[in-house]
Amino acid sequence: TELPHDYRLNRDKKISPEVFLAKRKALYLAEELRSITGRKTELPKINTDVSSLELSKRIRKLLEVDYEIINEIIETKPKDETVLSYYKSLIEDKFFIPVLEHPLKSTGVRAFSVFGDVSVMVLNESDQNEVRLFSLFHEFCHLLKRQDGICTVDIEKDKDNQPEEKYCDEFAAYLLMPEELVRGALQMPLSNLKQIDALAKKFGVSKVVTLIRLKELNILNQAQYNKLKIDLESLNKKAFGRRN
């Protein structure tokens, strides 16, 4: 006899119980916020059946990103202000989407989002600010598509076979590093990691994201990209004693 469908979650234990606990806390907070404020998340009514580049342009316009503020944060490095906190406040204020940070630690989960009356995003506070910033917009893309999302290390390794995840990655990269601003900030020729690091800091992103973006824009050819990627991996091994 054919067995009925098994609806039990996480049967193969790919996701840590810590993640499910964090999700329960996020759902509880969302419900409390709705009860206290009487507000609901106000996601923009926008067509997401467009290219990730086009969607990033529309959302960046809605967010009204002020790059002068970002530059000031990067240059002055105020104690309680980061590029991540600036973008978080934009999303929270404009769309009423609380952004939480939870110690997911070794769960293998970068971030996740829950779509609902009050949608919530949860970032892994164990990640560096640059990684959390990218995760923020990756998950925001899922919410724009009116869906839950979860980003794990396994998904990252296999994202070429997961078009939805690849789309959200592209959206995050295009929004955080618009082509016109990247080209305007370039100091050519690019030949070393110091230059890559300086460019990455201008946008508050990681050196890895910066390298990939420069390759996508054909600013770096394949040979240049490969060399700088090897240099970066070598630097990480020296800094951490293992591959980061």
Image (cartoon, rainbow, N blue to C red):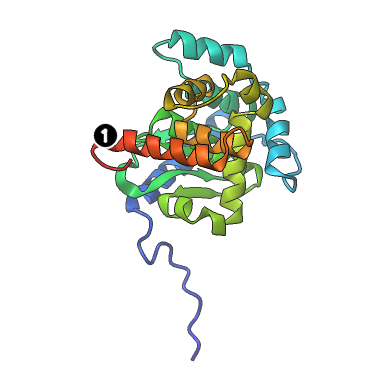
The reply to whether residue 36 is in sight is yes
> Residue 71: percent from the left, percent from the top?
55, 13
User: Height in image: 25 above or below 157?
Assistant: above
Q: Could you tell me which residue is drawn at 51 percent across and 37 percent down?
A: 224
- Foreground pick, 109 / 51: 51
> Residue 39: percent from the left, percent from the top?
62, 31
Q: Which residue is mark 1?
A: 238
- Foreground pick, 98 / 66: 66
Asked which quadrant contains residue 53, the reply is top right
Q: Residue furthest bottom?
A: 1
Q: Around disc 1, counting alpha carbons within 10 Å, would you say few (fewer than 14), some (14 to 19), or many (20 or more)?
A: few
- The image shows a total of numbered marks equal to 1
Q: Residue furthest top?
A: 76
Residue 127 falls left or right of residue 178: left
Q: Could you tell me which residue is drawn at 64 percent across and 35 percent down?
A: 217
Type of amino acid at the residue the image marks with label 1: Lys
Q: In terms of secondary structure, where does tag 1 sit?
A: helix
